[in-house]
Image (cartoon, helix red, strand yellow):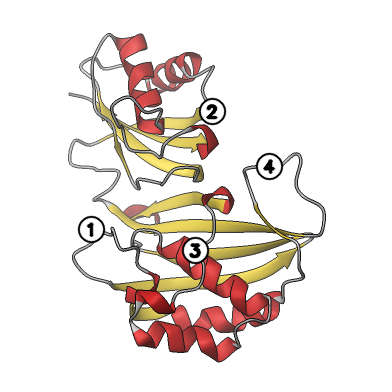
Amino acid sequence: MPRYRFTVEYDGSAYNGFQAQAGQPTVQGAIETAVTAFSGQSARIAAAGRTDTGVHATGQTCHVDLERDWPARTVMNALNAHLMHEAVAVLDCAPVSDDWHARFTANGRKYLYRILNRPGRPALDRGRVWHVKKPLDAEAMHAAAQSLIGLQDFTTFRDAQCQSASPVKTLDVARVARVGEEVHLVFEARSFLHRQVRSMAGSLAEVGLGRWAVADLSMALAAKDRARCGPVAPSDGLYLTGVTYEAEA
């Protein structure tokens, strides 16, 4: 069966996460409905990551196996036509070998967390940023974030429902910078624990607000205790921005 890789962008506000769930609107459900509508085939798609309720993506990667050998452009256009009334869009599409897998072949994932840092609430970006009214010290947040880089036990920033076999992960990039009225947090790693990014973002915001010292973040990490995590940041500001694969690294 021909296998197709495609990149997906979506606004997660209206969906109960990426993964298909009976009776719930999900990104996966919307895409699979579109696949059936254009191909007449019931097919399960695979994705590089299963984002939570309300989390967005500008660079989610998926694949699907189709019974017919369609031109890649036809697959992309057909999916977009049937996703017209969904907050989901297919950005590209290409054939891949049958041993290529959107999740298991991936060797890196990139996330962006957007904080709107101003007194006035968002109107145009409502549901797409975390609004923090009080001033944030982005430089202090960046300094604190450096203690998260490398091979670490991230138990403190691991959700209680996480199904990963180990809390040990290698964080390659942790960068915080002010961009106009926003503070952007960028994280890159091969893989992440459940709600790890939102947990780190919430704790870094505590540093930015002056409630935690820069050193408090490394102390929280070293404690390996979920109770030492700061408030978990809301899903609104989180974006899966890209997935990398061996040939692209």
Tag on residue 232?
3
Name the residue nearer the viewer: 88 or 242: 88
Disc 2 versus disc 1: distance between alpha carbons? 28 Å
Identified at 77% across, 70% down, the residue is 135
Q: Position of residue 221 (x, y in %)?
A: 41, 82
Instruction: Specify the amino acid type for callout 1.
Output: Gln
Q: Choose top left, top right, bottom left or bottom right for residue 76.
A: top left
Sequence order check, earlier mark of 3 and 1: 1
Tag on residue 163?
1
Tag on residue 126?
4
Tag on residue 87?
2
Instruction: Specify the amino acid type for callout 3.
Output: Val
Secondary structure category for the residue under label 1: loop
Disc 3 versus disc 4: distance between alpha carbons? 19 Å
Q: Is residue 154 visible?
A: no
Above/below status of 248 relative to 76: below
